[in-house]
Image (tube, rainbow, N blue to C red):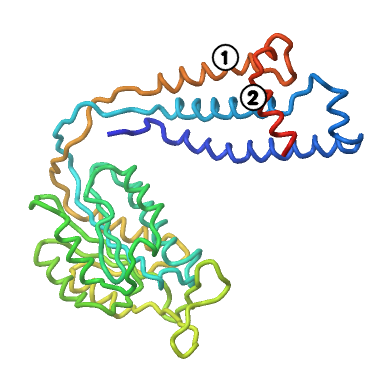
């Protein structure tokens, strides 16, 4: 298993596009200033030591070195030893609706993004629990098998969109059935399903699936996304909304009655999400009430550091950078390393 010991440092990679933008901007400004003095081709003859390519080469060498240093700071590691471990926790399967109706914006920024925010906070609270993820629309798919790898859980959450499920619809019953099967072998640990949906079920018997979950000792909690008054569904990449066959704008409404019935059948609770953290707090308290028990899991107990090669390569690039000058060097110019590229740039 590969991991970063300090993944928070990877956020520094967001600086890379900024650095590229600044470099491109300053390069354009330099060219404009040169044009103010006269014809660039004539000026180039008057400045034989000025290189067009070398500053670019130096910049990209430094940029790659910065990226490698950031990776070193994040401390890449490979797991080398697996051990079975017992933890006191619960098992949680999340069933997340990713149908197009979840893009409605009666909750900000939209129903799906708000659901992902709630789930992200719930995962942050987990320490010894197992968590898995099922996404569904017209069909249900296991996005993340039940695991204690919270980093992967957060990563999968961030990438979720309606495009994950090709067939549209809202097959809540299928999602619940898949969650039940995803728990695997029977365990003494408390088990629960967190269903997040707007309740527009058009496919199957969701209430019957919730009863089946309860019969298997699995409590089902429901978070309703949206408002009873509803909202139109934006068409991605446009300023318009989804319309029916008659040309009328489709308004997606939260089916609160359906959500409540599913929660009652599953022996859990129902809460409607809004623009506050109320839904997260209620579900979090419900999870705390579930009896914890020993959970057997395999974890990596030993990791090998892998940052050395990245650090060595970064150091090598910095050494090379010291030998690449902004201006042409008489000794190094004999090698004609940059000549062909510079001719190509001038012709372009």
Per the image, label 1 sits on a secondary structure element best described as helix
Q: Is residue 157 positioned above or below 46 on the image? A: below
Q: Is residue 151 positioned above or below 156 on the image? A: above
Nearest the camera: 123 or 78?
78
Quarter of the picture holding the C terminus: top right
- Residue drawn 69% across the image and 23% down it: 339
Q: State the residue position of label 1.
A: 319
Per the image, label 2 sits on a secondary structure element best described as helix
- Image coordinates of residue 149 in percent, x first then y, are 28, 42
Do the residues bearing badges 2 and 1 touch, measured as CB atoms within 8 Å?
no
- Residue drawn 44% across the image and 61% down it: 113
Determine whether, in the image, residue 18 is placed left or right of residue 47. left
- Residue drawn 57% across the image and 18% down it: 318
Farthest bottom residue? 246
Residue 58 is labelled as 2
Nearest the camera: 299 or 160?
160
Nearest the camera: 102 or 131?
102
Q: Is residue 95 positioned above or below 312 on the image? A: below
Determine whether, in the image, residue 157 is placed left or right of residue 145. right
Determine whether, in the image, residue 278 is placed left or right of residue 262. right
Residue 72 is labelled as none
In three-dimensional space, the C-alpha distance between marks 2 and 1, rounded to whole angstroms, equals 11 Å
- Image coordinates of residue 157 in percent, x first then y, are 37, 53
- Residue drawn 14% across the image and 34% down it: 84
N-terminal-most mark, 2 or 1: 2
- Image coordinates of residue 148 in percent, x first then y, are 24, 43
Farthest top residue? 331
């Amino acid at each position: 298993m590969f991991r970063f010991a300090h993944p928070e440092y990877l956020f520094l990679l967001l600086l890379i596009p900024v650095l590229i933008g600044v470099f491109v901007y300053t390069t354009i400004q330099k060219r404009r200033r040169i044009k103010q003095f006269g014809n660039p081709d004539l000026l180039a003859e008057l400045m034989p030591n000025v290189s067009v390519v070398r500053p670019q080469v130096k910049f990209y060498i430094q940029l790659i070195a910065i990226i490698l240093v950031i990776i070193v700071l994040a401390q890449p590691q490979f797991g080398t030893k697996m051990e079975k471990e017992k933890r006191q926790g619960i098992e949680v399967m999340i069933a997340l609706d990713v149908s197009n109706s979840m893009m409605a914006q009666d909750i900000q920024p939209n129903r799906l993004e708000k659901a992902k925010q709630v789930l992200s906070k719930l995962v942050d609270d987990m320490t010894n629990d197992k968590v898995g993820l099922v996404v569904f629309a017209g069909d249900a798919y296991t996005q993340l098998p039940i695991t204690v790898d919270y980093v992967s859980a957060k990563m999968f959450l961030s990438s979720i969109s309606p495009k994950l499920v090709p067939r549209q619809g809202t097959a809540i019953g299928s999602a619940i059935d898949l969650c039940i099967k995803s728990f695997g072998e029977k365990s003494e640990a408390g088990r629960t399903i967190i269903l997040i949906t707007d309740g527009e079920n058009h496919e199957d018997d969701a209430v019957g699936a919730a009863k089946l979950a309860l019969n298997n000792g699995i409590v089902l909690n429901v978070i309703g996304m949206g408002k009873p008054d509803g909202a139109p569904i934006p068409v991605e990449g446009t300023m318009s909304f989804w319309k029916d066959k008659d040309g009328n704008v489709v308004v997606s409404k939260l089916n609160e009655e359906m959500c409540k019935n599913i929660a009652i059948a599953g022996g859990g609770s129902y809460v409607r999400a809004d623009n506050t953290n109320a839904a997260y707090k209620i579900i979090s308290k419900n999870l705390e009430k579930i009896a914890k028990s020993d959970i057997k899991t395999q974890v990596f107990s030993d990791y090998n550091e892998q940052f050395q090669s990245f650090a060595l390569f970064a150091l090598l690039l910095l050494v090379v950078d010291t030998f690449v000058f902004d201006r042409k060097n008489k000794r190094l110019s004999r090698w004609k390393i940059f000549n062909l590229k510079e001719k190509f740039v001038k012709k372009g």
